[in-house]
Image (cartoon, rainbow, N blue to C red):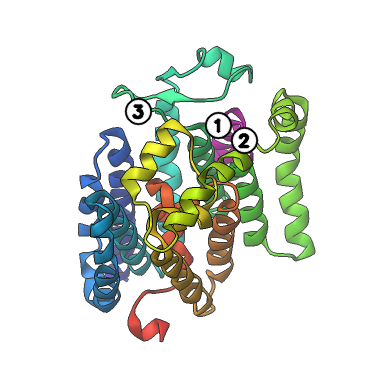
Amino acid sequence: MINLSFKLNKTTVYAYLVVSCFILSIIFSSYIFLIFSFLFCYEIFNKVRESILISFIFSLYFIFLGFDTFKYFVLMFFSIILISERFKDNPKIILSAYSNIFLIFLLYLFTLEQKVGDISNVLNFETRFWPVLSNGEEINPNMIGLLSAICAFGYYVNKKIIFMIFPLFILLISQSRSAMLFFVLASFLYSGVKLKNIFYFLMMLFPFIYFLNSSNIINRFIQDGENGRIARILYYFPYLKNNYLTGLGYGEYLVFVKNIGSLDNLFLAIILVYGIWGGIYLLSLFIIFFKNKKNEDSSLRLAIFFSFMVLGLFEGSFAFNHLTWVIFALSFNSFSIKMIK
């Protein structure tokens, strides 16, 4: 019994340390903290060393597209494989750690200057919640919305309903429609289709939907339409046509994002950046997910994986937001070669 308590405590501590490293990576604009997070997963490295080696060899091609492309891809698959294996038996623990730490982070964002207007304009729904870090880096409202949605979903899964209020409010002032869809879809899939669960889910969402309908946010939903996504896809189409085999590279893509805007579609963006190799990697994640063994966390894995994929129809999803890798990793039982054969 003593050993069991120690094991659970150790897992919880590691969960908080891993999530903290991801937070620090954005506050200090340094990926070095992601490497630190891997150190807390060293115990399971041998279980997934074959998958890591195969993925690493696969990623060597991206060196030809630039070191930034290679680095970002390696950090992504390391994060997903190691965190998935480390917390495969207790995904709710790291989901709880993520919610608690990001709740503090969301509170911190209230202390920052806004890109447009001030915090009073944001609270009156006149402008979107768009804070700017001290280093000048802007945190996009859609990213904030998604982080808030994950935070609220984590509290929902761990049955801490009262703590959902603040992240849901942040979700509202971010005015991110895709993030709202993510939260609703993830919560519904996790609850299941039983009548009791549906009733409970609808009762939980009623105040949220009422507030949404009575606020000025509904006007943005009507006026913004698809928010220029189709125009950007048409703009990127020639580059997709010319680079779908080799890929454009992550550094080049960031230049386009800064000047034009992002290609708000996971499936197209990953082909644009990584070429057909990115498509193969994404396909492999689908295969590994469908090979997941059924267990008590299957509904949680389904909710996370499917919600990220639906989000990918409107945003870059997990592939271009490293703060979500911790959560997306929970979609999988394991990346050990024995598990996925």
184 relative to 262 in the view: left or right: right
Which residue appears at 75% of the width and 31% of the height? 222
Q: Secondary structure at mark 3?
A: loop
37 relative to 167 in the view: left or right: left
- Residue 190: horizontal and vertical position, in percent? 62, 61
Q: Amino acid at mark 3?
A: Glu
Which of 126 and 43 lies nearest the eye of the viewer? 126
Magenta-highlighted residues: 162-177
Query: Which of the two marks, 2 or 3, is nearer to us in this view?
Result: 2
The mark that comes first in sequence, 1 or 2, is 1
Q: Which residue is mark 2?
A: 228
Q: Amino acid at mark 1?
A: Ile
Query: Which of the two marks, 1 or 2, is nearer to us in this view?
Result: 2
Q: Which residue is mark 3?
A: 137
Q: Which mark is residue 170?
A: 1
213 relative to 25 in the view: left or right: right
Q: Amino acid at mark 2?
A: Gly
Asked if marks 1 and 2 touch (Cβ < 8 Å), the reply is no
The mark that comes first in sequence, 2 or 3, is 3
Which residue appears at 56% of the width and 24% of the height? 128
